Image (spheres, rainbow, N blue to C red):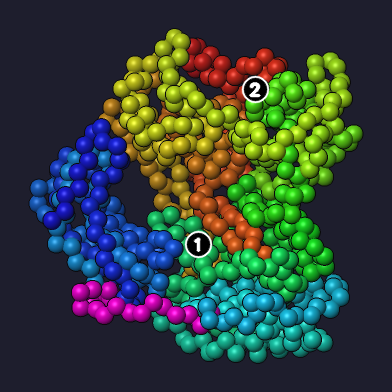
Amino acid sequence: MYIAQHQEGQDAEFGAALRILPGQFAGDSITLSGWLRTRDITENMAALLLRIDGPDGPLQYGNTFDQSIASTQDEWTYRQLTLPYPRDAQAIAVGGILHGPGEAWFDNFAVTIDGQPIGQLTPRPPPSYAAARDTAFLTGSRVEFPAVSPEVVDRLDVLGRVWGFVKYHHPAVAAGQHNFDAELFRVLPDYLAAGTQVESETVLLSWIERLGPVAPCDPCAEALRDPVRTVPLTTLTNLLTNELLVEQLGHIYRNRNAGQHYYVGLAPGVGNPDFRHEDGYVTMTLPDAGYRLLTLYRYWNIIYYFFPYVEETDRDWEEVLPTYIAPLLELDDQAEYEYTLLRLIAEINDTHAQLAGAEWIDHARGNRYAAVHLRHLAAGFTVADYYNDELSDTTGLKIGDVITHLEGRPLEDLVAEWKPDYPASNDAARYRDMARNLLRSKENMLAVTVKRAERTLDLTVPLFPQDQIDQYWGPAPRTRPALELLDDNIGYVSLQNITEQDVKLLPDTFAKVKGLIVDIRNYPATFVPFSLGGWLLKEDTPFVKFTHGSISNPGAFEWTEPLEIPASPDPYTGKVVVLVNELTQSQAEYTAMAFRASPLTTIIGSTTAGADGNYSSILLPGGLSSGISGIGIFYPDGTPTQRVGIVPDIEVPLTLEGVRDGRDELLERAIELIEKGM
């Protein structure tokens, strides 16, 4: 028998009793059953837990929280859950979990795979995939491309769409029987050599047939009942003229993969896509033209089928694929490759979507920085503070200086020129990221023109290696406590360095304050939407709902039920002011949504970064990588947050006067609101 116990005042929010079992078995589904009883818990907060781990982390996760259990259940109660069993499974975690105070007992666990007790099963050898053994093109694509013409672009556009469709729908590809990077290089020579569209489509048909027959599905993939988005097959087949090819693609779609997929899965418990078995080809300094085309095809199809915000981009994603074919095929060097990818990534308008590993871009931008932190105000890019106070006199710049020119060029012209190179959900996040690089160069000095009060000054600003300045992204590192009692009995909470212990102390520390200020102009050091958000609620309240993709229905997304925050038995009853700005991103925005669920809360500040949803990583040829916001985040009524950000109830922008005077205007306004009773 296992006992999970969690007392008030303990450090963890969860109590758990777990056992790890070997998991190298073959099968389609795994079932955990067991018995539990409870005492003095929050209703429905005790459950059986089942997790299946693979070589790179969790593959499946489930629990029985959705199967009601009373706060005190004296009789033993039976519970059961079933999950798909991954081919890559290596370990099975089973046990009981308790959320919140109280006690739970668990007993008589049983684990079966396809109905057979695991004690009676013979472990299988580690899975071996034909796709992983196909190394024919590791040193290069060996593809010769003709001169890029509109006709070539049109035909490569079609190929990229067909390649992506087959990759994510064909059962043999899903089973890991084909290295689909290599398959691209196998079909490209004949496809490019075909003289007409009819001939090129015949090449595609023969290539697809070589992948193997597609048997009638059993079981078949079920379409989502109420999808937010779907990708009709006609979007692809309307581009084709070969009726046999259209019928073949239709046959694949009707009998598409209905289970796990070699190249993509959904993260357990969350649902954001996990792009597996993609090779980053890190030894390729500059991938050849074939691999550069692969980069485009891989990225475009990942976004097309699995990015939850693909319909929120400025440019129709259908237009993006043909736009980048010529630039990627015709470039000459690594720097141009990286810049082209950066602009491709910027097309999805997601602040999470950056380009990592871009050494040539970093080299071009330089490795020396001014020792000042810039912020973007209505007046322009402004010196907000110093990275090192001891260098304040050396820089020649003063707090409140507005940058107008760099090396004699108007800054507004440079910003317009650089804008495509800064992926972001909105301009607030873009200018935030751009500010870090404005006073950056390979040189030791930078000619800068500033506006200081009513004067215009031409300055020569020294630049320092990054390791000589205490450079930071976002707000200045906070050295004061996360919890402070301000004058006139107002509580202040900074999430920048908050700990779980701080969260537990907070109700007693601030129970009697006249108002509470929560500062999320940062990235929270501890996850607090439920623990702190619940303290602001008198009743359980929904605050968010999600969309996530489908492995069996690529391109389709569906809603989840709204997620609720459990209310505190002794909630705070005063007014709450939450501070946000462009530094508020991802988990910080999610946290602000949780606080907004309380009728006590007023959010003030300025536009946030507009990038929420668990991060999914994408490997790209040449040792590069990017990522996306992997699940859609919405308010319970369907109002979006991506790109929009957390819209403040009261706009309080940073002003030039406030910066020059060293004031925290947002904090001042929060105190004023509480003093006036909101």
**What kind of element bears circle 1?**
strand
Q: Earlier in the sequence, mark 2 or mark 1?
A: 1
Residue 409, relative to residue 510: is it above or below?
below
User: Residue shown at 25%/45% (left/top)?
Assistant: 15
User: Residues at badges 2 and 1 in contact (C-beta under 8 Å)?
Assistant: no
C-alpha separation, residue under disc 2 versus residue under disc 1: 44 Å
Q: Nearer the viewer, residue 621 or 368?
A: 368
Q: Nearer the viewer, mark 2 or mark 1?
A: 2
Is residue 494 rendered to the left or right of residue 37? right
User: Residue shown at 79%/43% (left/top)?
Assistant: 442
Q: Where does the N terminus fall, quadrant-wise?
A: bottom left
Is 270 magenta? The answer is no
Residue 426 lies, in percent from the top left, at 67, 42
Residue span colored magenta: 113-131
Identify the residue at the far left of this view: 75
Amino acid on which the number 1 mark rests in the picture: Asp
Mark 1 surroundings: few (<14), some (14-19) or many (≥20) residues within 10 A: some
Residue 510 lies, in percent from the top left, at 36, 20
Q: Nearer the viewer, residue 64 or 484?
A: 484
Mark 2 surroundings: few (<14), some (14-19) or many (≥20) residues within 10 A: few
- Does residue 126 appear in this view? yes
Residue under pointer 1: 274
Residue 567 lies, in percent from the top left, at 32, 35
Q: Which mark is residue 389?
A: 2
